[in-house]
Amino acid sequence: MMPQVCARCQTTTSQPVVVAIGYGASAGGSTVYACPGACADSFPGQRDPFERTLPDRDVAFRRQG
């Protein structure tokens, strides 16, 4: 992966960790990176975008099988 600027400490890191996806109405999305360790751990956890995309009947079916 290419070096990125940490969103927390503003330093360049050669091992960036994705901590968020920023969404914008006009510019589209952007990826937010942080240094591994303390900087990355200081960001809140992100929810899984696919967590609620399956209908409840599909989830129940998968549990049975």
Image (cartoon, helix red, strand yellow):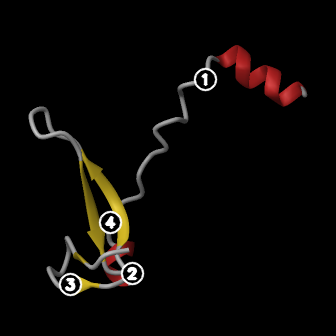
- Residue 17's image quarter? bottom left
Mark 4 neighbour density, 10 Å: few (under 14) some (14–19) many (20 or more)? few
Mark 2, secondary structure of its residue: loop
Residue at which label 1 appears = 54
Residue denoted by label 3: 12
In-image side of 4 versus 47 (left or right): left
Marks 4 and 3: in contact by CB < 8 Å?
Answer: no
| x then y, percent, for residue 65 | 90, 28
> Label 2 near label 3: C-beta < 8 Å?
no
Which callout, 3 or 2, points at the residue further toward the start of the chain? 3
**How far across and down, in percent of the image, does residue 52 sit?**
54, 28
Left/right of residue 5 with respect to residue 36 in the rendered view: left
Q: CA distance from mark 1 to mark 2?
A: 32 Å
Residue located at (72% from left, 19% from top): 58
Which residue does the numbered mark 2 point to in the structure image?
Answer: 36
Residue, x 83% and y 29% (percent of image)? 63
Question: Mark 2 belongs to which amino acid?
Answer: Pro
Closer to the observer: label 3 or label 2? 3
Residue 3 position within the rendered picture, expressed as x and y whole percent measured from the top left: 27, 79
Q: What SS does tag 1 mark?
A: loop
